[in-house]
Amino acid sequence: MINSTQKLMTLGVLSKEWLNFNQNILKRSTLQTYKYMVNKHILLKSISSCSIDKIDTDDLIKYTNELLENSLSPKTVNSVLLTLNSIFKYGKLKYNFKPPYIQYVREKKVKTRVLSVSEQKILEENLRNNFDNFKLGILFALYTGVRIGELCALKWGDIKLGTVKIDKTMYRLKDDNGKSSIFINEPKTSNSNRLIPLPDFLIEIVEKYRKRDGVFFLSNKQLCYIEPRLMQKKFKKIIEMCGLKGVTFHTLRHTFATRCIECGFDAKTLSEILGHADVKTTLNRYVHSSLELKKNSMNMLSDIAV
């Protein structure tokens, strides 16, 4: 049973206690994300002053609507609610209070963008014109499927003997005051640590620009790293020049996966190259069959037609 002292505990106090409990358990990036969520979207709201044994589903619905009215996207609101759910689970284990039901916001399903073969050709023609470090990075991502953080964290020493070793990622992280800084850390999951063989044509291009091992693969004239935010900015300009719509840097990863399937890759091999824990994730999230591939597959039935 929850005692009288614990009945006086507010959600704000419990949230701070939960953060302190996870101080030496979670990865720095994960902990900092939770800190930002708690400080900005929980402690500053009226719900933080509510006693934990008094909060009910109606309170959470009002709180959710308040977040949405503050122009937060459904995805961000759900991230806040997931954080709140973890806090409630901690409170249940330690103080034996019954958490209220959390109703998540329905997110609009966005159709995954994949470059068609003709669009990819347009992009590559642009990349090969006035080639520079940014265009090298884009071409590299298009033919390896690496994430933008993984790409920016690469050093030349990671690219050897026709392979690239992925064992770190670069990201921009906000502190408690909302100020952001660049960090380089291990990837999100152990499966993201991987060795990717490079296609021969890409090896030939990469070797023309090789620098010493300790230099970042993508670097400026001062040999300092190029961060993801700048890479995205440059990528956006190139995409606009190509006249392509609805394309983000992550589109390159989706496009890589789709082209691999079209070329006959088996799903297990592709899953390992992408750094997924299982094949199902690869097939459900990243592989999108083109109309041309569907036509070719359907035409195989002609071979058995009487």
Image: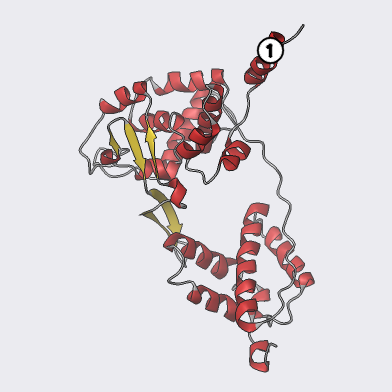
- Residue at 65% from the left image edge and 80% from the top image edge: 49
- Residue at 45% from the left image edge and 60% from the top image edge: 29
Q: How is the image coloured?
A: secondary structure
Task: State whether residue 130 appears in this view.
Answer: no
Task: State whether residue 7 appears in this view.
Answer: yes
Q: Is residue 126 left or right of residue 153?
A: right
Neighbour tally class for label 1: few under 14, some 14-19, many 20 plus, Cα within 10 Å: few
Q: Tag 1, which secondary structure?
A: helix
Residue hosting label 1: 299
Q: Is residue 4 above or below residue 237?
A: below
Residue that sits furthest to the bottom in the current view: 4
Q: Position of residue 1 (x, y in %)?
A: 70, 88
Image quadrant of residue 2?
Answer: bottom right
Q: Position of residue 82 (x, y in %)?
A: 63, 62
Residue 283 vs residue 148, the one in the foreground: 283
Q: Name the image quarter holding the C terminus.
A: top right
Q: Is residue 292 above or below residue 14?
A: above
Q: Is residue 168 left or right of residue 289?
A: left
- Residue at 48% from the left image edge and 34% from the top image edge: 269
Amino acid residing under circle 1:
Asn
- Residue at 57% from the left image edge and 38% from the top image edge: 282
Q: Is residue 113 left or right of residue 153?
A: right
Residue that sits furthest to the left in the current view: 212
Image quadrant of residue 115?
Answer: top right
Q: Position of residue 153 (x, y in %)?
A: 35, 45
Residue 228 vs residue 114, the one in the foreground: 114
Residue that sits furthest to the top in the current view: 306
